[in-house]
Amino acid sequence: MNAKLHPLAVWGLVKEARTALEDDRPLLVTGALAETLEQELGRGGSPGAVTLRGSVEHAAALVRVLAGRPTEDDEQALRAANRAGVPVVAVQTGTESFDVPYVLATDVVVCRPGAGFPTEKIARVLAARLGESATPLAARLPVLRDPVCDALIESFSRKNGILGAAIFVPGADFPVLTLNQVRLVLRLASAHGIEVDQHRLPEVLGTVATAFGLRAVARQVLGAVPIAGWALKGGIAYAGTRAVGEAARRYFAASAD
């Protein structure tokens, strides 16, 4: 089977990435010591990318700082975010840990007294919680950029690793895996505040060429090792996608400087 990648599918991803860059919703920080955390998260970022005020419904995400056990005000703020479908990361200060309503345990960051806010950890939890929708914030907030890029590369590599192992028809996986790689490259561009248009499209097409070479190797492996070939094929898809992502990250980081 000789599956092909349709140019319109690639262009659809380009338009999707360009639309995502238009999302200017801020990161809303509220609660105890919110002013301090707002300054740390917003350091070097675009004005207004992090805010202490505003409606949670119009925020990209909410970071709520808790001073010990959640208060009634805390619960009200978290409930409002939950109802609005806004992702929440809770930062829990103090010497004790408490259950935080409306927030997953994996989205709670503990801040021990005297240690200062663990900004990098907060950024990584935000990146994991927001997924692909974190790219507009990453473009405006340097503290989020590396964590978001790390999360994107790992997520897309895992997806392609699973798909590479699961699709057995020779060549049938090429469009799916390559579109994922193109999407990854475009999301990484967005995370650096770079818009991919017709002039930058050759960069994306370069990804397609790289992917084709990787899939050719995988097909040879599958033919030579028919029993365990699926596992090797998945490993090649994972490693190839990660290589594409890391190369794209370096390219866009240099372009953004």
Image (cartoon, rainbow, N blue to C red):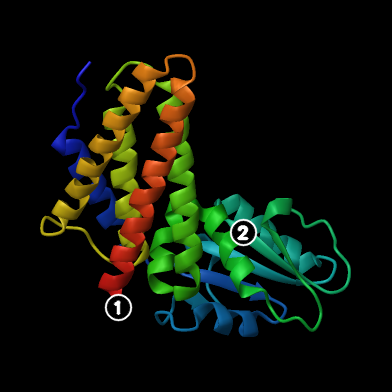
Q: Nearer the viewer, residue 5 or 113?
A: 5
Q: Nearer the viewer, residue 19 or 179?
A: 179
Amino acid tagged 1: Asp
Residue at 53% x, 67% y: name it: 55
Identify residue for label 2: 88
Where residue 32 sits, quadrant-wise, is bottom right
What x and y, as percent, mark residue 35?
62, 84
Q: Residues within 10 Å of mark 1 (few under 14, many from 20)?
A: few
Residue at 41% x, 28% y: name it: 233
Q: Is residue 142 left or right of residue 9?
A: right
Q: Secondary structure at mark 1?
A: loop
Identify residue for label 1: 257
Camera sees residue 255 = yes
Amino acid tagged 2: Val
What x and y, as percent, mark residue 146?
47, 66
In front: mark 2 or mark 1? Answer: 1
